[in-house]
Image: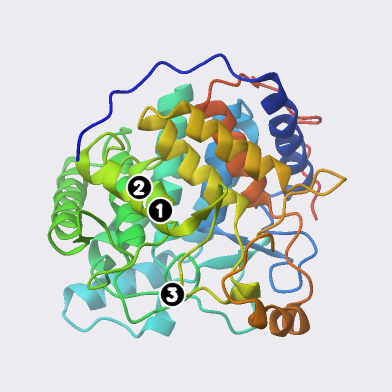
Amino acid sequence: MTLQAATPPSTPRVDFIEPARLGVQLIEHLQDADGAYPASPSFSAYAGYSWFRDGAFIADAMSAAGSTDSAERFFSWCAAVLEAREARIEAIIAAARAGAPVADHEMLGTRFTFAGEEGSDDWWDFQLDGYGTWLWAAGQHVRRHGGDPTPWRRAIELTVDYLIASWERPCFDWWEEHAEHVHVSTLGCIAAGLREAASIGVLDAERIELARSAEAAILERIHRDGVVDGHLSKWIGSREVDASLAAVVGLLDVVPATSELGLATIAAVRGELAVDDGVHRYLADTFYGGGQWPLLSCFLGIAESRAGNTAAAEALFSWAASTATESGDLPEQVRTHVLAPDRFDEWVERWGTVATPLLWSHAMLVRLAVELGVELGAGAGAGAGAGAGR
């Protein structure tokens, strides 16, 4: 594949500014007083919960948009959740080092109530990606704004130790599916998190060396076992692609977007999963019929932008923004093109209509806008850091 030369970003379009500002305002308004970002305020399966993964990407968007207080309150919430489980995390690490790892259901969960508690309902909980993304987002924030990560030191140490001990384990992916596999996007999240944790000045020399060694081993595993037909694969051993891979070659910068592998992965995601700039999760998706996700169009847009394809990134932004309701809310997915139309009604009967608004969707639109040169600045939203407590 011929590498494409990056082109200078064009002047950001004026019509990108308002959707991004609305997103910042919505996220600030809905953020809980203690720092958690609700996944969706009213969707039956998500209400009352905050995910480390979704929240980390939301915090990164808020940080990039200049809403530093919002991002830092989320990182402090993550730190409190982890420090409250210090003994449990140390037991998990000790068991792994002794060659007797704990069962999946004893590992850390993927989502918590705003008060930092596990939920009472069953969930597909064992996921490692969120613990990598919170480290990555915190590290990016410190790089961007020069903040002090010292208050999060112990939580960062615990997370690094947990990921070093656990990264090789199969677990659920971004979509809470396929727990039997090792997912390439999960490996990417962990590698990015360890990279950032090792570079922001809070770890001792031994942990830095261990984090960097683990990052190198993860990258080796990705390149050795997570590539098929020249592009990243959905999981180790799969020949399919997944739209979450756009984050690995875009926002997380684990595989550079301008590299041969990065360009091939972008092309595979676009070629197999994008229809008129709306991006599906993966081809076998049946969740709410397998619709198109605005947040995934934004992830792909960031990757396209970093590969030098500004026009493609702008088109993806425009599509994502066009999915908003009359009140400006972005959904989790839309039905403009579905992969399994006969599977839509069963999910409506189970959980109700599609999650709207989904804060992760708004965050990725904000993040893509910033990537395209839109300047929102500090105080872009109304009532920064107010904490709606919803």
> Eyeballing the image, is 383 above or below 243?
above
Q: Nearer the viewer, residue 235 or 103?
A: 235
Foreground disc of the pair 1, 3: 1
- Residue contact at pointers 1 and 2, CB within 8 angstroms: yes
Within the image, what quadrant is residue 342 found in?
A: bottom right
- Residue contact at pointers 1 and 3, CB within 8 angstroms: no
Q: Is residue 140 left or right of residue 373?
A: left
- Residue at screen point 51% across, 16% down: 10
Identify which amino acid the numbered label 2 is placed on: Ala
Q: Earlier in the sequence, mark 3 or mark 2?
A: 3
Q: Position of residue 133 (x, y in %)?
A: 43, 51
Q: Is residue 175 left or right of residue 317?
A: left
Mark 3 lies on residue: 126
The secondary structure type at the circle numbered 2 is: helix
Within the image, what quadrant is residue 96 found in?
A: bottom left
- Residue at screen point 73% across, 39% down: 28
Distance between the Cα atoms at labels 1 and 2?
6 Å
Mark 1 lies on residue: 271
- Residue at screen point 35% across, 85% down: 103
The secondary structure type at the circle numbered 1 is: helix
Mark 2 lies on residue: 267
> Eyeballing the image, is 228 above or below 294?
below
Identify which amino acid the numbered label 1 is placed on: Gly
The secondary structure type at the circle numbered 3 is: loop
